[in-house]
Structure formats: structure tokens, C-alpha cells
Amino acid sequence: MAWKNLFDKKESEETIERIQKLTPEKQPNWGKMNVSQMLAHCNVAYETIYTDKHPKPKGFKKFLVKLLAKNAVVGPKPYKKNGPTSPIFKISDARDFENEKNKLIGHIRKTQELGANHFEGKDSYAFGPLNKSEWNTLFSKHLDHHLQQFGV
């Protein structure tokens, strides 16, 4: 499946338009997270790149994550509904909708502005170096999955 190119300004803005359609009252089509938690969950992917908030897995744990999850995350197949997630991505506390939404939009715009070449060969949180196509799939597929979860 071809995913939106979030390094492209037009395509990243199309994704942002979908995010703008979310409201705090929006209910999920599947899953346990509310819309604010989902936005926070999506922010974690960017926080692992732009902050040191989440300690990286090391050693055998990193090996297992890479072995078991990398292809599912950066491969072409869409995510399954209610699939497993890494513990750092589990959001169970209350989150502020506007704050999480604005943070996510900021991350998308920052990533687009940095561009694909910035991400070529950049180390990911758990998978080691990824090429720009893998980075785009990681971002785009994850966002699309959760925006579909909330019907936008």
C-alpha cells in the first residue's frame, strides 16, 4: 500500500486537515483510547525522535523489538485493529485534547520542514537506522491508522 508522503508539504497538510476534524467528543470505531489519548499516543512516535523523554531499549530487548516489530511498523501492510503496542505508546491517563492536537500538528510540520534527507539513515528509537521511505511509512501508516480509528 502507498502511504501519504509526509515529507511533502501538500500531503502533510492533508493529514493535518484530518486531525483538525477531530473533536474532544469524537468516539473511536475500535480500541480503548479516547481521542485525547490517541493524539498523545501518536505524539510518542515523534517524542522518540525529538526528545529524550523515552529511554531507548537496549541489548536483547532492542534485538527482540527489531526482530518482531520492525517489518510491521515500516512495512507496507496496514496495522490491524486492536493490535499490540509497545509499553511506551500506551496512554491511559487523561490528556488535554488541544495541547495534544497542537503538539502533533507541530511534530508533523517540523518533520516535513526537516525533509526526507534529514531522516535518511537516521537511527530510530528501536529499529536502528531507517531510510527515508521507512521513516515516512512509520509516520504515515501510524497516523492514518489512528485517524481511521476516529473516523477522519
Image (cartoon, grey):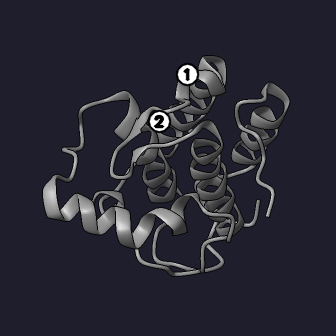
**Residue on which the image places disc 2:** 99
* 50 versus 44 height, above or below: above
Q: Residues within 10 Å of mark 1 (few under 14, many from 20)?
A: few
* 27 versus 58 height, above or below: below
Q: Position of residue 140 (x, y in %)?
A: 66, 49
Q: Is residue 76 visible?
A: yes
Front one among 99 and 144: 144
Residue 27 location, quadrant:
bottom right
Please state if 23 lies on the left or on the right of 119 as rendered. Answer: right
* 120 versus 58 height, above or below: above
Please state if 129 lies on the left or on the right of 140 as rendered. Answer: left
Q: Kindly identify the amino acid type of the residue bearing the numbered disc 1.
A: His
Q: Kindly identify the amino acid type of the residue bearing the numbered disc 2.
A: Asn
Q: Residues within 10 Å of mark 2 (few under 14, many from 20)?
A: few
**Residue on which the image places disc 1:** 118
Q: Residue furthest top?
A: 113
Q: Residue furthest left?
A: 59
What's the residue at 50%, 58% (across, down)? 38
Q: Position of residue 94 (x, y in %)?
A: 34, 56
What's the residue at 61%, 63% (across, down)? 75
Say which quadrant the C terminus sits in: bottom right
Q: Helix, strand or loop at disc 2?
A: helix
